[in-house]
Image: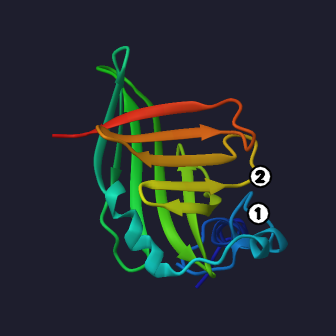
Amino acid sequence: MFIPLFALVAGIGLLTIVPQDPQPSVKTVDKAPSVAAAELVKKWDPADLKKMDWLCGTWVSEDGGRTTEEHWRPLQGTTILGSSHTFDATTTHFFEHLRITARGGSIAYLAMPGGKPAVAFLLVTLDDGVMVFENPKHDHPQRIRYERTKDGVTATISLLDGTKAQSFVFKKKA
């Protein structure tokens, strides 16, 4: 079987950027924290993913004619799959494939904005109704925080020091 060299090289590059195995090392994801940095992060048990079940469902935020929906599927295996879609009546403004998964003793939030290669953010905090993921090597955001609220969920992205923060206030879709 003949495979053009560019296809083979492109395929190998894709495998190193977007891991298919649910537990590859952190270094296989583009812009992920280094292995040394990952070792400084608290080790998480895959069972901790069950504590995130409150995030599952479809969440809606409306702002000035634009709607953002995040949909999180229930935990299956060691992964919670998600997607985000921002649109108005005529245009899709943004979309993102998401997943929260157990990976090599860590739990990571992997974001693929606009279908780009995955960027990993490691779980640093998991409390009742709060989860925080960080990647200090990423330009923006460096921190992703989800908090369960009385009326829904608030997702906040920011730099590690809290600057350049942007919050999305979601309500459960009926």
- On the image, the x and y values in percent for residue 134 come to 67, 54
- On the image, the x and y values in percent for residue 26 come to 70, 72
User: Which residue reaches farthest bottom?
Assistant: 1
Q: Looking at the rendered structure, which numbered label has been put on residue 94?
A: none
- On the image, the x and y values in percent for residue 78 come to 44, 77
Residue appearing at x 53%, y 43% in the figure = 114
Is disc 1 surrounded by few (<14), some (14 to 19) or many (20+) residues within 10 Å? many
Distance between the alpha carbons at the discs numbered 2 and 1? 7 Å
Residue 6 relative to residue 123: left or right: right
Question: Compared with residue 92, is residue 82 higher up or lower down, i.e. above or below?
Answer: below
Is disc 2 surrounded by few (<14), some (14 to 19) or many (20+) residues within 10 Å? some
Q: Which residue is mark 1?
A: 33
Residue appearing at x 66%, y 42% in the figure = 141
Q: Given the image, on which type of amino acid does mark 2 rest?
A: Pro
Residue 14 relative to residue 167: left or right: right
Q: SS class of the residue under badge 2?
A: loop
Q: SS class of the residue under badge 1?
A: loop
Number of dots carrying numbers: 2
Q: Nearer the viewer, residue 71 or 161?
A: 161
Q: Nearer the viewer, residue 141 or 20?
A: 141
Question: Compared with residue 153, is residue 165 higher up or lower down, i.e. above or below?
Answer: above
Q: Given the image, on which type of amino acid does mark 1 rest?
A: Pro
Q: Does the residue at mark 2 contact the one at mark 1 (Cβ under 8 Å)?
A: yes
Q: Name the image quarter holding residue 162.
A: top right
Residue appearing at x 84%, y 73% in the figure = 36
Residue appearing at x 56%, y 59% in the figure = 110
Residue 44 relative to residue 49: left or right: right
Q: Looking at the rendered structure, which numbered label has been put on residue 136?
A: 2
Q: Nearer the viewer, residue 10 or 125?
A: 125
Question: Compared with residue 19, is residue 147 higher up or lower down, i.e. above or below?
Answer: above
